[in-house]
Amino acid sequence: MKTVDRLDRNNIPKHIAIIMDGNGRWAAKHGKPRVMGHENGVESVRAVVEGAGEIGVKHLTLYAFSTENWDRPKAEVEALMALLVHAIEAETQELNKNNVRLSVIGCVDVMPENVQAKLQGCVDALQNNTGLNLVLALSYSGRWDVLNAVKKLAGDLANNKITQEKINNELFQNYLSTAELPDPELMIRTSGEFRISNFLLWQIAYSELYFTNKLWPDFRKEDLFEAIIDYQNRERRFGKTSEQLTS
Ligand code: IPE
Ligand code: IPE
Ligand code: MG
């Protein structure tokens, strides 16, 4: 039986977030420079975007570059920025054909201007599509997101746009970069690391976490489907007892 046929089509997560990790180790394993790992990771992005679209996932958030990744060697950062521009140029048409929409979360203002322009061009080109919403987390960190939200909220408080009593989960959520998105039901990390590395922090309060040893450039559709099948076999209790859920 094919992996895709083992999926429960009535329980597909609406939002999946992925920490795409292990490009450098993949390259080392193949005796190649790190950047080749990143290049090969693009094929995995293509595969999961296609797979997620096929089974009706609504939002797919990919952690592509963290706030902390700016501290990598200058040559690697430059190579990643160049790769991003190249990938956007190469993929926009295919994404459009697949009815994919693109969004970006993160502190994009600090990205090189040519990268910002390319990203915006791609977002604009795909804005009317109604299929999968591909969310790229770029120059992103969970703490940046929360602090950015707090700054905006503090501004609205100072301008009397809101009052302190109005602050609750729903209101706060609207100040985050993910305001338009439901919280991810499933978060995947590749490469055998068991950490969040400052990805979505507020948003994953109740996400199911899935870790795999696969290195990102080896990750394919079937791996995405396996992760979803694993998710589908979990009991999400949200603090309640198992008995409460089944009665
Ligand atoms: C993930 O792969 C890609 C980015 C963080 C940009 P890494 O480059 O972190 O690969 P490893 O962890 O060194 O193997
Ligand atoms: C997390 O991977 C960031 C992205 C995948 C973009 P890292 O490789 O940067 O994380 P750490 O440093 O190992 O925690
Ligand atoms: Mg890494």
Image (cartoon, rainbow, N blue to C red):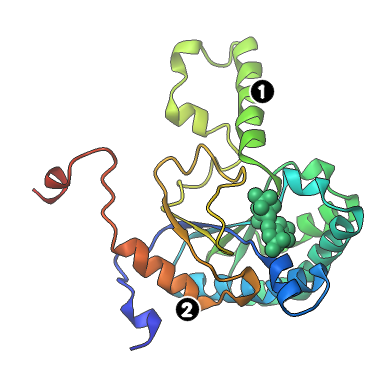
Pick the front one: 126 or 204: 204
User: What is the CA distance from the residue labelled 1 to the residue labelled 2?
Assistant: 41 Å
Q: Quadrant location of residue 11?
A: bottom left
Q: Position of residue 15 (x, y in %)?
A: 47, 56
Pick the front one: 187 or 56: 187
Q: Position of residue 118 (x, y in %)?
A: 82, 59
Q: Residue at x 26, y 54 (%)?
A: 235
Sort mark 1 into few (<14), some (14-19) or many (20+) by Cα contacts within 10 Å: few
* Quarter placement of the N terminus: bottom left
Three-letter amino acid code at the position of disc 2 = Glu
Quadrant position of ligand 3: bottom right
- Secondary structure at numbered mark 2: helix
Q: Which residue in the structure is indicated by mark 2?
A: 222
Q: Which residue in the structure is indicated by mark 1?
A: 151
Q: Earlier in the sequence, mark 1 or mark 2?
A: 1
State which mark lies toward you, 1 or 2.
Answer: 2
